[in-house]
Image: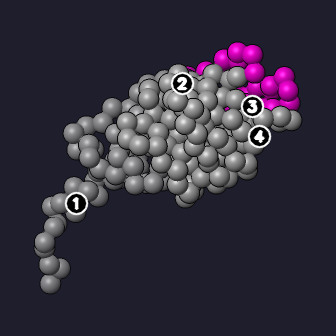
Amino acid sequence: MGESRRISLAWGGQAELDTSSRLDIVGETLNVTGQVYVSAGQRPLNLAFGNGLVLTTAGDVNVRTRGRYVAILAERAPATVRGARDRQMKIAPGNNLVMGRSAPRVSPAHDPGALTSWRDGWLTFDNVLLEEAAAEINRYQKKPIQLTAAGRGLRISGSFRTDDGDGFLKAVDRAVSMSEGRDEGAGRSSK
């Protein structure tokens, strides 16, 4: 728990696996579960996900899967995703493809460094529900963080070390205190 691993691929590429992630190599296809950053190396590679999608790239990609949810960041080269009935979606460098329950969408990655900060031991959040941020931090903790009712529904922004659950808790305490103060003071004049 809380560890990432780097592996060298036989054809010269590299893969870095996030905590609680798995990469199975079947022939020339990498089957991804969790989150992985892959550099293709000397030839294009295929990454497959449990939902029948296959990604082909000759560059660097960050892939995150969670159930039916898949997010792919193409960093330095385009990527192509093939899905059901051979439907293809192209991802230009610097763009992010997100698929889940709603229709797939490709959009510019506003902060690619935030999406890959896990590789350096950081998690970066920008106006994320506190419950989602805590769930992400908990992936790296031996002792999970539990939110009180006061923290639910709040949003948080910032960068946190994956190995510093206490630092995250201090930030949460400050956010909850500030939120409670704003609620109590709403509509009061300082005059």
| Picture residue at 70% right of the left edge, 29% below the top | 46
Task: Verify whether residue 184 appears in magenta.
Answer: no
Q: Amino acid at mark 1?
A: Gly
Q: Name the mark nearer the viewer: 4 or 2.
A: 2
Furthest residue in direction bottom, as rendered:
191
Instruction: State the image quarter where residue 53 is shown.
Output: top right
Say which mark, if any, is on residue 181: 1
| Picture residue at 78% right of the left edge, 35% below the top | 44
Which quadrant does the N terminus fall into?
top right
Q: Nearer the viewer, residue 184 or 53?
A: 53
Furthest residue in direction front, as rendered:
85
Say which mark, if any, is on residue 58: 4
C-beta proximity under 8 Å, tags 3 and 4:
yes
Answer few, some or many: residues within 10 Å of disc 2's Cα (few below 14, many 20 plus, some between 14 and 19). Answer: few
- The boundaries of the magenta stretch are 1-28
Mark 1: which secondary structure?
A: helix
Say which mark, if any, is on residue 97: none
Q: Earlier in the sequence, mark 3 or mark 2?
A: 3
